[in-house]
Image (cartoon, rainbow, N blue to C red):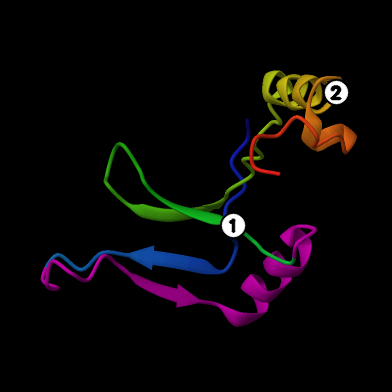
Amino acid sequence: MEKIYARGLFAKRNEKAPEFVICSLSVKTDDFTQFLKENTNEKGYVNLQVLKSKDKGTLYAVLDTFEPKASTASTEIKKAVKTQDNDPFQNGNSDDLPFN
């Protein structure tokens, strides 16, 4: 999968900064605004990951394109449970329930 770099967003770690400061971010407004417009998902978000390069340890941001896949096994189990004929809650037959 090809990395899509966050155009106009720059992350930099200052080694002299306190440990709780992870990195500083700089935004080139025009470039990053265009990147956001081009990569906004259907819910209105742009998800990014800040990564560290293997060679120099340089920080950079990429578009997070991960999309979870629906589990077909859990969907089939839910369908099977909902279609049981002897379920008093599904069929409105609550005469057999001990707390009526």
- Which of the labelled discs sits on residue 83, or is there none? 2
Residue 83: percent from left, percent from top: 85, 23
Give neighbour class at mark 2: few <14, some 14-19, many 20+ (Cα, 10 Å).
Answer: few
Q: Nearer the viewer, residue 11 or 47?
A: 47
Residue that appears at 77% across and 62% down: 38
Residue 73, picture quadrant: top right
Amino acid type assigned to the residue bearing label 2 in the image: Thr
Residue that appears at 73% across and 21% down: 72
Q: Is residue 38 above or below residue 58?
A: below
**Horizontal side, residue 75 vs residue 47: left or right:** right
- Which of the labelled discs sits on residue 47, or is there none? 1
Quadrant in which the C terminus appears: top right
Residue 35, picture quadrant: bottom right
Give neighbour class at mark 1: few <14, some 14-19, many 20+ (Cα, 10 Å).
Answer: some
Amino acid type assigned to the residue bearing label 1 in the image: Asn
Residue 85: percent from left, percent from top: 86, 20
Q: Which residues are magenta?
A: 16-43
